[in-house]
Amino acid sequence: MAELRKFVARHAAQEPFFVGVDLGGTNVKAGVVDDLGRPMSWLTLPTNSSAGPEDAVRRMGLAVKQATIDAGLQAAHIARVGLGSPGTMDIPTGMLLEPPNLVGWENFPIRARLEVHCGHEVTLANDANAAAYGEYWVGSGQKLTSMVLFTLGTGVGGGIIIGDLSVDGHHSTGSECGHIIIDISPQARLCPCGQPGHLEAYCSATAVLKRTEEALAQGRPTSLRRRLADGSALTTVLLAEEAEAGDPLADEIIVETAHYFGVGVTSLMHVIDPEGVVIGGAMTFGGNDTPLGRKFLAEVRAEVRRRAFPVLAAQTSIEYARLGGDAGFIGAAGLARLEHRRRHRM
């Protein structure tokens, strides 16, 4: 990630300038981005969500101002601010409705309040959709005309970009890729949202660890037992380490995850027919930099070839994301840039 966050200097940057804010349950990231999607500054601060949403937007407003100063700019240089937020929302009204990881933030006018605290007009977006736009604009999807981003982490997020359109949906819940249904059997696993058979119930880090715990409870032989006995915590990183060391069970669980994931990818390919699919998030098993990450991607592609229309399987690219944790704030800035352009064309 370090090589991606090369800041462009003020004299080399292209106007207009935008600030992107990526709100997470633990941390907030903010940074200035120029008209070509190049970061000019970046900072992070704790969300401190227990202090409530008003305190958080006040500090986000200060972060916007500090990021502007760090980029060598004044407030008048910022054309617009983009905010990517988790949780259900009403984008047209700027309301945050029921964010599951932000207790007490229900029905909060987050866009209007951030506008007050930062002094700029704000574009509100779902955080995964913002990340998708970041990858589309200047990441792995920048040569694509349309793409789907999946983020594999504690849950499974997603974003769909078609042209310069982020598919937000009529009720602001579009692109919830983790909640497509891949299992309708009576034994289907339960998603954290409460519904059975969703992709997230099979391909999130939480789901992967649950399947691992079930295998351990069944007495399956595995080197994971020794690591756990030595005091290591059961994480997907530990699972990846043991898979790379040759443990059959760890390898089986990761390959099985790739097959489930390939089913979900195929479903969206048949619905959307995107030019490419991009895979990001914390659980990519090292991505292109490790043999295991490359194996995971190869298994996903193989599952897609088994299930997709031949023309889709042959012509749809499936790659890892490039921007890492920066995709959110860059994409939020990019969506603000789109709205700024639309308004100035009117």
Image (cartoon, grey):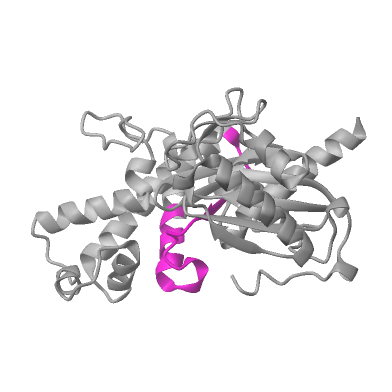
Identify the image quadrant of residue 54: top right
Q: Is residue 278 visible?
A: yes
Q: In the rendered structure, which segment of residues is drawn in magenta?
A: 272-300
Residue 306: % across, % down = 42, 46
Of 336 and 269, nearer the camera is 336
In the visual, does 199 lie left or right of 120? left
- Is residue 296 found inside the magenta-colored segment of the image? yes
Figure check: 164 above or below 34: above
Residue 245: % across, % down = 28, 76
**Quadrant showing the C terminus:** top right
Residue 185: % across, % down = 25, 30
Of 40 and 150, nearer the camera is 40
Q: Which residue shows up at 45% across the image and 61% down it?
A: 284
Q: Which residue shows up at 41% across the image and 49% down it?
A: 303
The number of callouts visible is: 0
- Is residue 54 found inside the magenta-colored segment of the image? no
Figure check: 75 above or below 224: above
Of 322 and 119, nearer the camera is 119
Q: Which residue shows up at 65% across the image and 41% down it?
A: 161
Residue 339: % across, % down = 79, 38
The residue sitting at the top extreme is: 170
Of 60 and 142, nearer the camera is 60
In the visual, does 119 lie left or right of 222? right
